[in-house]
Image (cartoon, coloured by chain):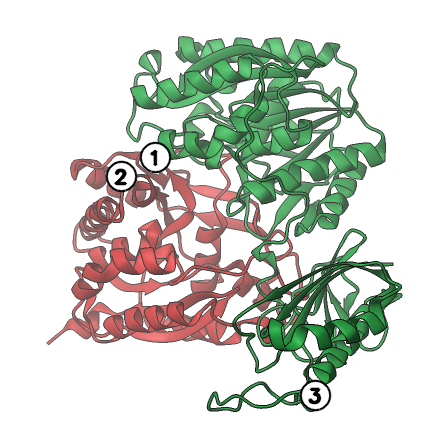
Chain colours: A green, B red
């Protein structure tokens, strides 16, 4: 078991810096203390933290400075005082986490810079839960644009890294529930959740979590956030649920639920058990890899984005692009996106292929000649839309040749194709001919295939393949 | 406070850390091969313009000091520390020393409260000044030979609505102007924000690879040009009318309130603004724009 226990805690600094000013804040502080005791008694190697207050926009960041040290002052609550800290970070795990996240398609980097501003939420959690740095920690950012799929994948990547490193972790999601702050000064002694509606939603979530129904809460997160202004859409719950296995088999403990400056603050513990707390109803799709819009710079027209671990090198006087080991025939690796010079130019902002883990996902590939852009067998219509005679056998052969070019440039081959989706613009006219040519090349491959008729393709071609193949 | 103070110049002064990174100043640890030159040249022209002015203080409104409980104002005489951009730590690790005009800061605080706004002085000496403030001030006045006043960005636009945010920032702008006039200071105002703000979420390697830099999409460009045309023709009241739509359509960073604060402090100029530069940074639209109140003279 890679996760010993999971916790949800608030990140506001009040329970750390001024618990005596409010009974509510003191209750939260006391709950932190109970969690600290549980963590101390647990056999874990690592404290894994996701904080909604560490916002990133360029993918995700993982703290990798082994001993970050600073005197932190919250930008909003500076009058509460400063928080000097020196933490112990598991830099090896941070690197493993970033690597695992990249393998699942997430743009991720580690940060290890003197003076990097660790967010208030992470600082509060580490000061109250791990005051002596008994456990090394790992902190990961909350991408402000990430939605559910990306955050689930981020949680699963944390689990991948735990498995590969053989470590047992305690996971901590630092988040408010409802996040509506009072916008004027208040009397802390009279702090309360900012609306009855928010309060009722918070209580429902705490009740479910107390029953161990983490996945049910994860499924409810969107609705909760829409109704009660959830902290960063309650991404921290998605991350925790994905990391802990996406089920309801937990023993839940609701240590406290109180207001902090109008927000809903809960301290909850979840320990894996064999017994399901409830039969969950899964409404939303799961995600294993991220294939969202983080590659918006990629593609022919806008050039290629890279990150520091890509094989694109950079010198002080010039920029050179080098091929990755194993990649040949003029291919350029862009993160995990692949563009191949010897293949037809894409007609939009997409690469020819994208590698995720051991799989290659090819974009839709047509028959256009890579050198002349002409269509073997002729176009299906002329520039004014008048139908033309065309040879689907020649087009199909050209498609297969282009697919082969891309696969081989990416370190794969036709023999390693797993699945093919074929698009034909005229099934009645073309299927038999296409099918014969296809068989000439794929008969011994054993790839699964689906053939569908569609109205049109972006260029005047009759056939296009969408291919998934084993990478190596 | 002696009276007779004035705002001698107002500027839209965007704060992408990329621009400081591109300049390679000694305070910033990362090194670059340049980049974003047109915007940096625009700041150069702004600095030339400032060199012809006598001024005592820079007042800056920054989106990256976000507050919810009112408007906060730096209230410590001197800061010396290191700022690391949490988003772009690879570009901005900047050692700063700066002085604050605390008397003027307190005067703005008092005027803001008098106007009915929630305002608070930031008195904690360990406070780290945000990189939006530092970047705008560095680019406008790299010698740091003038004190600053730093204003936080209240999140009313996000928390309530564009209209509520605009209303608050207009009051804060007027309060700033009154405080400056009563103080006898000659002040330069910097609104530290970009225009359109949809941006790429991956980064080229190296970040200053200008072959990858362009506006995020054409619609943003059109909106930015519309806004700059209104500025260039002195139509700031019309700009304020259209601002809520601009904020929604382009996710503009003017949603921080900085632009509204600036134009309000300048009395909604009807004289032409001077656009020193327009350029993009990771797809966002940025402009260095100057308003010289002397141009309002008949």
Which chain letter goes with mark 3? Answer: A
Callout 3 secondary element: loop
Read off the residue under disc 1.
Answer: B121
On the question of residue B144 being in view, the answer is no
The x, y position of residue B116, in whole percent, is 17, 36
* Residue at 74 percent of width and 40 percent of height: A97
Which chain letter goes with mark 1? Answer: B
On the question of residue A213 being in view, the answer is yes
Contact between labelled residues 3 and 1, with CB atoms less than 8 Å apart: no
Identify which residue, B112 or B68, lies in the foreground.
Answer: B68
The x, y position of residue A306, in whole percent, is 69, 63
- In the picture, residue B158 is in which quadrant? top left
Contact between labelled residues 2 and 1, with CB atoms less than 8 Å apart: yes
Relative vertical location of residue A190 with respect to residue A460 in this rendering, above or below: above
Marks 3/2: CA distance? 73 Å
Residue A376: which disc?
3
* Residue at 68 percent of width and 10 percent of height: A38
- In the picture, residue A202 is in which quadrant? top left
On the picture, is A324 further left or further right than A150? right
On the picture, is A447 further left or further right than A423? right
* The furthest residue to the left: B298
Q: Earlier in the sequence, mark 1 or mark 2?
A: 2
Callout 2 secondary element: helix
Read off the residue under disc 2.
Answer: B109
Contact between labelled residues 2 and 3, with CB atoms less than 8 Å apart: no
Marks 1/3: CA distance? 73 Å
* Residue at 31 percent of width and 66 percent of height: B54
């Amino acid at each position: 078991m890679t996760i010993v226990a999971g916790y949800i805690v608030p990140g506001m600094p009040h329970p750390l810096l001024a618990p005596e000013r409010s009974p509510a804040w003191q209750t939260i502080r006391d709950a932190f203390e109970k969690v600290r005791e549980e963590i101390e008694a647990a056999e874990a190697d690592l404290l894994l933290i996701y904080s909604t207050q560490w916002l990133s926009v360029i993918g995700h960041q993982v703290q990798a400075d082994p001993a970050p040290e600073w005197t932190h002052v919250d930008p909003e609550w500076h009058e509460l005082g400063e928080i000097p800290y020196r933490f112990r970070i598991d830099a090896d795990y941070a690197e493993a986490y970033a690597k695992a996240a990249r393998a699942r398609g997430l743009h991720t980097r580690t940060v290890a810079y003197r003076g990097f501003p660790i967010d208030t939420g992470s600082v509060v959690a580490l000061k109250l839960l791990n005051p002596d740095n008994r456990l090394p920690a790992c902190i990961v950012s909350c991408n402000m644009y990430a939605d559910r799929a990306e955050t689930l994948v981020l949680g699963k990547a944390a689990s991948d890294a735990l498995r590969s490193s053989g470590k047992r972790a305690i996971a901590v999601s630092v988040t408010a529930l409802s996040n509506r702050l009072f916008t004027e000064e208040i009397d802390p002694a009279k702090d309360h959740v900012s609306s009855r509606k928010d309060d009722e939603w918070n209580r429902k979530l705490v009740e479910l979590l107390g029953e161990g129904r983490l996945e049910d809460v994860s499924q409810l997160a969107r609705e909760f956030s829409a109704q009660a202004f959830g902290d960063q859409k309650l991404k921290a719950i998605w991350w925790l649920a994905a990391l802990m296995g996406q089920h309801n088999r937990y023993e839940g403990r609701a240590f406290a639920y109180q207001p902090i400056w109008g927000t809903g603050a809960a301290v909850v513990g979840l320990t894996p058990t064999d017994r399901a707390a409830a039969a969950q109803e899964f409404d939303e799709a799961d995600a294993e890899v991220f294939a969202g819009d983080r590659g918006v710079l990629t593609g022919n027209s806008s050039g290629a984005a890279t990150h520091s671990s890509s094989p694109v090198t950079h010198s002080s006087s010039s920029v050179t692009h080098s091929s990755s080991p194993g990649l040949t025939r003029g291919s350029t690796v862009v993160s995990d996106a692949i563009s191949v010079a010897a293949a037809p130019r894409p007609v939009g902002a997409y690469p020819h292929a994208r590698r995720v883990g051991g799989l290659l996902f090819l974009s839709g590939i047509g028959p256009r000649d890579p050198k002349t852009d002409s269509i073997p067998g002729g176009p299906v219509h002329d520039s004014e839309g008048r139908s033309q005679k065309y040879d689907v056998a020649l087009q199909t052969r050209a498609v297969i040749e282009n697919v082969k070019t891309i696969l081989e440039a990416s370190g794969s081959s036709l023999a390693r194709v797993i699945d093919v989706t074929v698009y034909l613009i005229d099934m009645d006219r073309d299927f038999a001919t296409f099918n014969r040519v296809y068989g000439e090349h794929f008969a011994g491959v054993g790839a699964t295939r689906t053939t569908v008729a569609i109205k049109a393709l972006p260029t005047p071609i009759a056939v296009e393949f969408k291919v998934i193949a084993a990478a190596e | 406070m002696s009276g007779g103070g004035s705002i001698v110049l107002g500027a839209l002064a965007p704060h992408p850390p990329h621009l400081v990174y591109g300049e390679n100043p000694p305070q910033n640890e990362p090194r670059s091969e340049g980049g974003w030159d047109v915007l940096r040249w625009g700041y150069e022209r702004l600095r030339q313009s400032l060199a012809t002015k006598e001024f005592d203080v820079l007042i800056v409104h920054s989106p990256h000091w976000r507050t919810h409980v009112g408007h906060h104002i730096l209230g410590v005489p001197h800061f010396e520390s290191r700022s690391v951009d949490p988003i772009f730590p690879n570009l901005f690790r900047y050692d700063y020393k700066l002085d604050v005009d605390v008397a003027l800061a307190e005067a703005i605080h008092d005027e803001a409260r008098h106007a009915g706004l929630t305002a608070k002085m930031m008195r904690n000496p360990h406070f780290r000044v945000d990189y939006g403030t530092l970047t705008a001030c560095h680019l406008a006045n790299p010698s740091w030979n003038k004190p600053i006043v730093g204003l936080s960005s209240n999140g009313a636009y996000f928390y309530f609505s564009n209209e509520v945010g605009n209303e608050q920032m207009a009051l804060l702008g007027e309060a700033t102007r009154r405080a400056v006039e009563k103080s006898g200071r000659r002040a330069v105002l910097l609104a530290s924000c970009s225009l359109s703000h949809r941006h790429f979420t991956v980064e080229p390697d190296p970040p200053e690879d200008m072959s990858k830099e362009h506006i995020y999409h054409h619609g943003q460009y059109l909106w930015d040009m519309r806004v700059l045309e209104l500025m260039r023709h002195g139509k700031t009241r019309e700009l304020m009318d259209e601002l809520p739509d601009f904020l929604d359509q382009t996710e503009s960073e003017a949603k921080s309130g900085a632009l509204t604060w600036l134009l309000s402090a300048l009395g909604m100029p009807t004289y032409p603004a001077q656009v020193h530069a327009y350029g993009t940074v990771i797809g966002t639209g940025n402009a260095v724009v100057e308003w010289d109140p002397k141009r309002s003279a008949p």
